[in-house]
Amino acid sequence: MITKSTLDILRDMADEQPRQRQRHSDQEHRLQCACVQWFRTQHPKFNHNLFAVPNGGRRDKVTGAKLKAEGVLAGVADLILLKSNADYGALLIEMKTGSGKQSEVQGRWQKAIEKDGYKYVLCRSLDDFMREINAYLKEVQG
């Protein structure tokens, strides 16, 4: 009996095509979930260092105003790995599908955060995410 590896299951989850017409964000959501699940399995020592920034999504005006007052900032990357390595203070990860485009405000935030000395990457697949995480963590001290 042949069984799929966990990595194959996560790749399938990330690449799954919607059965019905779904919004673009659902595809990006599945990709990000697969990436986080892989990270939690492969790097449990750093589970507390990787977190999502829930900036997107539909919200009414009142909720949007409350979140903005609390410090929500447009353009912030989807995931933050709050762990310094030999070269950077943190890794900021923007998740996009293969055809997804970075918004203008995301591009401005990327430039500002890179100017501050942080590493920012755009990941379009589970393989992109794994490569970026593994390369970044290879340079972690201690």
Image (cartoon, grey):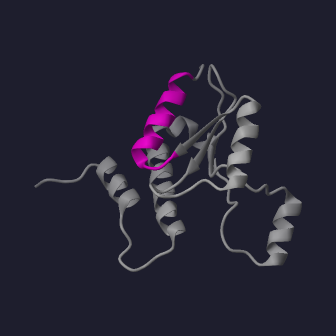
Residue for point 89% across, 62% down: 69
Relative vertical location of residue 46 with respect to residue 54 in this rendering, above or below: above
Quarter where residue 84 is shown: top right
Chief secondary structure of the magenta span?
Answer: helix
Residue 63 % position (x, y)? 80, 73
Q: Nearer the viewer, residue 48 or 32?
A: 32
Left or right: residue 139 versus residue 71 is left
Question: Which residue, as the protein is rendered here, is positioned at the far right?
Answer: 69
Q: Nearer the viewer, residue 25 or 35?
A: 25
Residue 24 % position (x, y)? 51, 68
Looking at the rendered structure, the number of numbered marks drawn on it comes to 0
Question: Which residue, as the protein is rendered here, is positioned at the far left?
Answer: 1
Q: Which residues are magenta?
A: 123-139
Left or right: residue 122 versus residue 103 is left
Residue 80 % position (x, y)? 64, 44
Left or right: residue 123 versus residue 85 is left
Quarter where residue 15 is shown: bottom left
Residue 64 % position (x, y)? 80, 70
Left or right: residue 104 versus residue 67 is left
Residue for point 44% across, 47% down: 38
Specify the quadrant that holds the C terminus. Answer: top right
Q: Is residue 115 magenta?
A: no
Specify the quadrant that holds the N terminus. Answer: bottom left
Q: Is residue 126 magenta?
A: yes
Q: Nearer the viewer, residue 82 or 48?
A: 82
